[in-house]
Amino acid sequence: MPARIDHAVVETDDPHATAAFYERMLGARIVVEEGRPVKRVAVLVLLAAVAAACGGSSGDAVAHVGKTTITRSELREAVGHFKDEAAAEGRPFPKEGTDGYRTVERQALVLLVYRAELLQSAEKLGVRVSESDVDARMKSAGTESDAGQFARDTVRSQLTYEGVYAKVTSDIAPTRRE
């Protein structure tokens, strides 16, 4: 079943700027609620925006982000990675079918959607990360370049984030006061 996001709460010091950001990124209507003691932005995603972001049911798809389809196998791989990490760290991992397991699945899906959104935003900005960039970063981190696809995608996302950050902050200079 495709992912469905009805609302989210984002804590921020500047709720109106945050709302504007999410309106641009999601194409959704944003309602700003100021709470006490922390200002909050309640992100209410309209049904149309949810349908556009998550799509209908198309076989193995669990979510659609723009033109990118996130498949059930990609979600299983991400959950499997989290399970392997838990085992390596000696932490328990929830059993399939439990609320805990569904929570891990949702967290993995949020991560995969974030990565897809990041890659699409990077493409719009002209930020590109090559396979050789990924290999070089993995080598410098001491990770085998033949590590699983999830590990490669993690490195690709990190490099993409760094590239996007560099691009959008390149013309920002400190103020005289700073």
Image: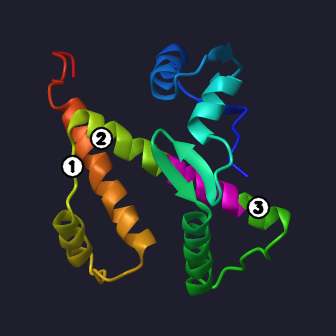
Q: Tag on residue 108?
A: none
Q: Amino acid at mark 3?
A: Arg
Q: Do we see residue 44 in this rendering?
A: no
Graded by Cα atoms within 10 Å as few (under 14), some (14 to 19) or many (20 or more), the crowding at tag 1 reads some
| Image quarter hosting the C terminus | top left
Pointer 3: what residue? 102
Residue pushed farthest right?
Answer: 98
Q: Which residues are magenta?
A: 104-113
Q: Amino acid at mark 2?
A: Ala
Pointer 1: what residue? 128
Q: Do we see residue 122 in this rendering?
A: yes
Q: Is residue 138 left or right of residue 153?
A: left
Based on the picture, tell me whether residue 108 belongs to the magenta stretch.
yes
Task: Answer whether labels 1 and 2 touch (C-beta < 8 Å).
Answer: yes
Graded by Cα atoms within 10 Å as few (under 14), some (14 to 19) or many (20 or more), the crowding at tag 2 reads some
Graded by Cα atoms within 10 Å as few (under 14), some (14 to 19) or many (20 or more), the crowding at tag 3 reads some
**Picture residue at 58% right of the left edge, 32% below the top:** 52
Residue 114's x, y, as percent?
Answer: 49, 46
- Mark pair 3, 1: CA separation: 33 Å
Q: Which of the two discs, 3 and 1, sits closer to the camera?
A: 1
Q: Amino acid at mark 1?
A: Arg
Dominant secondary structure (helix, strand or loop) of the stretch shown in magenta? helix
Task: Answer whether labels 3 and 1 touch (C-beta < 8 Å).
Answer: no
Q: Is residue 37 above or below residue 58?
A: above
